[in-house]
Amino acid sequence: MARILLHVLLIILMLSVPVQACSEEVKVILDGEELDLEPPALVEEGRVLAPVRSFLEALGGEVIWDGKEREVIGRWGDFELIIPLDSTEPIVNGEERELDVPVKVIAGCTYVPIRLIAESLGGDLAWDGASRTVFWDTASPGDLSVFFPGESAVGTEEKPSGEKISINSASPQKLQEVTGVDERLAQAIAEYRELNGPFWKIEDLLQVPGIDEKVFAAMKDEVTVVYEERGMASWYGSEFQGRRTASGEVFKQDELTAAHPELPFGTYVKVHFPPTGKEAVVRINDRGPHVPGRIIDLSRGTADAIGLRPYGVAEVIVNVMGKQGN
């Protein structure tokens, strides 16, 4: 009897070992509804960790402790997560997973990266650093490209295999690497777009000092002018209705317009919202957002058109389409 009690006490002790965690809580919005997690999700080493028991129970699942095998087992429908206390590699539906952030026991509660569960259940994740909120839409076939603290959330300068890079978003270093231009010309391209705004056609490269017909011919097949940003979007409405925008126009909350920090007024952009799969073409007529970490501020009409309004702030993909009248 004493041996059994000692074994139980050892298990309790192991589950109670405290681990340093981020003091700020994280909200989790699942399909538009906030999960009631107690304890809450946390940020650790740039990743969002979810408490296994309260997370799966909030989904309608269950979590049990297997004392014989010394494992925490979570189940929800066809999903099964096994966390051996002697291993840093959890087992998801019979397959071992290697984590860049290990399973943690914090104040007696087992935490795993939320991406581990989401990758198995499917859907689309988005992270809003301003409100410290994870949005998870299980109905979307998204790629789970969620951005957490420590990960870059803006820019698309990497060049996928067989694709061109954008001269409107590629860094000078990337321009050198892909096109073969020297450091001086790569910097000249970056300075030109900073002073004059985005390139609207490939031939605009000839306006950059130092780029002649020969250089242009050598690099034109490696680049594109597609201007894409991926980042957090917010929306604004009735409190600004009837006021003058930065362009001088009167703001009308139900029209498809948006505020952007630098794109010329009259520019049309396509805004895609992964959680709903909806998109809208809108016109830039204002400046904003004025909150760090956000790339575009949408009118209420735009937010309604793509289904973003219930989220408040969420990740979108913005593609520049051209100037007004083009």
Image (cartoon, helix red, strand yellow):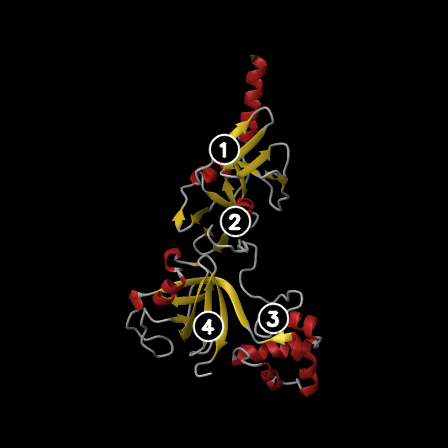
Q: Is residue 226 left or right of residue 187?
A: left
Pointer 2 local density, CA inside 10 Å: few below 14, some 14–19, many at least 20 = some
Q: Nearer the viewer, mark 3 or mark 4?
A: 4
Considering the numbered disc 1 on the image, is that residue within a helix, a strand or a loop? strand
Considering the numbered disc 4 on the image, is that residue within a helix, a strand or a loop? strand
Q: Could you give the CA–CA distance between mark 2 and mark 1, rounded to whole angstroms? A: 20 Å
Compared to residue 306, the image places residue 35 above or below, namely above
Q: Could you give the CA–CA distance between mark 3 and mark 4, rounded to whole angstroms? A: 19 Å
Q: Is residue 79 left or right of residue 289?
A: right
Considering the numbered disc 2 on the image, is that residue within a helix, a strand or a loop? loop
Q: Which residue is mark 3?
A: 170
Q: Residue at x 58, y 20 (%)?
A: 7
Mark number, residue 269: 4
Considering the numbered disc 3 on the image, is that residue within a helix, a strand or a loop? loop
Compared to residue 198, the image places residue 100 above or below, namely above
Compared to residue 153, the image places residue 89 above or below, namely above
State whether residue 185 appears in this view.
no
Q: Which residue is mark 1?
A: 63
- In front of the other: 80 or 1: 80
Q: Could you give the CA–CA distance between mark 2 and mark 3, rounded to whole angstroms? A: 31 Å
Please state the total of marks drawn on the protein image. Answer: 4
Task: Name the kind of residue labelled 1 in the image.
Answer: Val
**Mark earlier in primary sequence (4, 1):** 1
State whether residue 298 appears in this view.
yes
Task: Name the kind of residue labelled 3 in the image.
Answer: Ala
Give coordinates of residue 202: x percent, y percent.
59, 81
Q: Which residue is mark 2?
A: 122
**Mark earlier in primary sequence (2, 4):** 2
